[in-house]
Image (cartoon, rainbow, N blue to C red):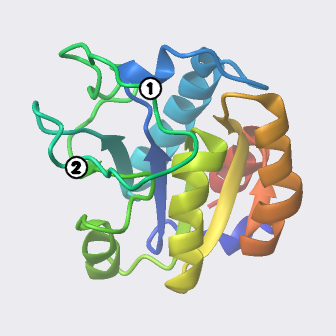
Amino acid sequence: MAASTLDPRTTALVLIDLQRGIVGRPTAPHSAEDVVARAARIAGRFRELGAPVVLVHVAFSPDGADMLRQPVDAPNPPAERPADWSEIVPELGPKERDLVVTKRQWGAFYGTDLEMQLRRRGILTIVLGGISTNFGVESTARDAWERGYDIVFVEDATTAFTAEAHAFAFTTIFPRLGRVRSTEDLLSNLAKQ
């Protein structure tokens, strides 16, 4: 990625599901702790540049009536979620001017105001990271691509519940939807703005 390709006036950072209930799960190939630390560094740089930081989290009503319930072969196991399950981790904020989007499914576009918030700010490029690579991040990326956004995936600020799932998305799917970069590559390019 050339240093001049990311314009902070038209680029937003979108971080998926970096919340207490998901960050607390085992992840691979990157630990959730490392992903949160890298995401916080990137978010800090975006904030310095005045570029939008969007923190997406998944949450459901107390009775779970707003959860999807289609018949599937591998349903999520029923679980009691702690009260802080959907809270964004404190390392990320939210900070003043951050946008917080609440979703009720894997992807961050359907049923939320994410697209309106991005369009009204003139956003053309999304820098994407979070947990889990092949669920929330990939679902959001596919929707973003179909809506015409340029996408930059931050490989080491993204992780999955298995290393194999992460590798498949980053070698097979994401290069067809956008550009794959590391945190250091992204930060060095942003530093040159």
At numbered mark 1, what does the secondary structure look like: helix, strand or loop? loop
At numbered mark 2, what does the secondary structure look like: helix, strand or loop? loop
Q: Is residue 38 visible?
A: yes
* Label 2, residues with CA under 10 Å away: few <14, some 14-19, many ≥20: few
Q: Residue at x 37, y 19 (%)?
A: 20
Residue 106 picture location, percent across and down: 44, 52
150 with respect to 99 (left or right): right
Q: Residue at x 67, y 34 (%)?
A: 159
- Nearer to the camera, 61 or 175: 61
Residue 2 picture location, percent across and down: 81, 69
Residue 165 picture location, percent across and down: 77, 41
Q: Residue at x 51, y 73 (%)?
A: 143
- Nearer to the camera, 86 or 41: 86
Q: Which label is found at residue 97?
A: 2
Q: Which one is earlier in the sequence, the residue at label 1 or at label 2?
A: 1
Seen in the picture, residue 110 relative to 63 is either above or below; the reply is: below
Q: Which label is found at residue 77?
A: 1
Q: Is residue 7 visible?
A: no
Amino acid type, callout 2: Arg
